[in-house]
Image (tube, helix red, strand yellow):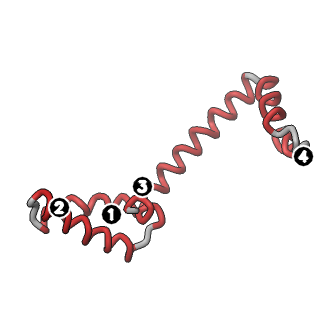
Amino acid sequence: MLRRAMQQEKAEEMAEHRDNFRAGAIATHGITQDKADEIFDPMEKFAGYGFNKSHAAAYSFLAYHTAWIKVHYTAEFFCANMTVEMDNTDKPKVLF
């Protein structure tokens, strides 16, 4: 649930998770509230920009490899795409 709240950047949900995190850290590990906040703060900061950057990096990586395969293995690239899109003959036209 925390990961989902981080991904959707919901501040009120993150605040609830902070409270749960604090309570669990204090009860289970005997950590002080200040130390629990110190641990949670970087996760909250990451939620603001981390998911966006990781998605952008993953998609650019995929786009680069797809373009490389299209250039160096053209026949195989089109054959694979036509096989995947057998039922939709309009889809491969976009690739040309």
User: How many residues crowd mark 1 within 10 Å: few (<14), some (14–19), many (20+)?
Assistant: many
- Whether pointer 3 and pointer 1 mark residues with C-beta atoms closer than 8 Å, the reply is no
Q: Is 26 placed left or right of 77 in the picture?
A: left
Return the x and y of residue 74 as percentages of the image width and height.
Answer: 79, 25
60 and 87: which is toward the camera: 87
Residue drawn at the location 42% of the way across and 55% of the way down: 50
- Whether pointer 1 and pointer 4 mark residues with C-beta atoms closer than 8 Å, the reply is no
User: How many residues crowd mark 4 within 10 Å: few (<14), some (14–19), many (20+)?
Assistant: few
Residue type pointed to by label 4: Asp
Residue type pointed to by label 1: Glu
- Label number found at residue 50: 3
Distance of label 1 from label 4 (alpha carbons): 44 Å
In this view, 88 is above or below 41: above
Q: Which residue is mark 4?
A: 90
Q: Which residue is mark 1?
A: 44
Return the x and y of residue 14 as percentages of the image width and height.
Answer: 35, 70
Residue type pointed to by label 3: Gly
